[in-house]
Image (cartoon, helix red, strand yellow):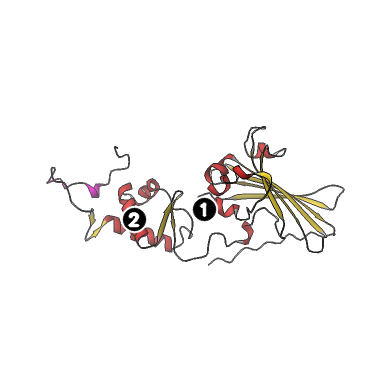
Amino acid sequence: MARTTPHDPLQASPPSAPHHVPHGPPHFGDEPLYRRIATELLGELRDGAIPPGERLPGERQLAEHFGVSRETVRQALEVLRRDGLVATDRRGSHATLQGPPVETPASLTFPVGARYAGRATVSWESPPPGHAEALALAPSRATLVHRYWSASADGRELRTAVSSFSAVALSEVEELARYRDRADGATAAELRRAYDWLRRAGLTLHHRDTITRIAGTPSVRVTRRVHDQYARPLEITELIVDAQQDALVYEFTLPAAV
């Protein structure tokens, strides 16, 4: 198959020997080029350019970043894999350096507002009114819908949430797609790490939370809309908090930068 990557002049045969077929890897000075790229990439990983567990850019992007061919990038990644610094699966390559895990931030718990041990189920159905438009789905198209119920220990606060996922989220996140065949609306579901799964699939999450009081009731509605770095919708959640008290405390924690 013909190669479509940019030509790497450092891998070409010397002009003085046009018929010579070079043996062994290309060198940069006394060091093979792919090893120099491996060292540079490792340096960027250690500087925190890509957090541990996050997916690395694709070979084409790395080749453009370092100004080499995809084959050189492939060899560099293999060096890091052999040293246990990079792992590769069906979703791509990711750094395995020691550091805080991707799922550390408490603010990433799904769904928004999940504070107490509750009950959750998933179903495969048409999303609630307003969700289809927010997720760019046809009105009658079915998707994965998650329902959550919880109550405080004293019974004074009830939380119910309905979340719907977009076609993009289901096509790019294997952990979510697996639920389709068992989304019967009755089987218990554990999606607390849904946001971590989205991030590990290479998606940057942008969320917007809107809090409104429901007129004539002691309840408030929290609506969270999540999209990725390409402005594609991923998920929408509507949380209803029935708080039998005058004040509602919405608490969250952001970890300190390391």
Residue flagged by tag 2: what amino acid is it?
A: Glu
Q: Which residues are magenta?
A: 2-21
Q: Which residue is mark 1?
A: 200
The dominant secondary structure in magenta is loop
Q: Is residue 2 left or right of residue 129?
A: left
- Residue 234 seen in the current view: no
- Residue 241 seen in the current view: yes
Q: Is residue 2 left or right of residue 206?
A: left
Residue flagged by tag 1: what amino acid is it?
A: Arg
Few, some or many C-alpha atoms within 10 Å of disc 2 (few <14, some 14-19, many ≥20)?
Answer: some
- Please, what secondary structure does the residue beneath circle 1 have? helix
Q: Quadrant of the N terminus?
A: top left
Q: Residue 142 colored magenta?
A: no
Q: Is residue 231 left or right of residue 85?
A: right
Q: Is residue 10 above or below residue 137?
A: below
- Please, what secondary structure does the residue beneath circle 2 have? helix
Q: Residue 5 colored magenta?
A: yes
Residue 28 x %, y %: 24, 57
Q: Which residue is mark 2?
A: 78
- Location of residue 144 by image quarter: top right
Comes first in the chain, label 1 or label 2: 2
Q: Name the residue at 78% across, 63% down.
A: 153
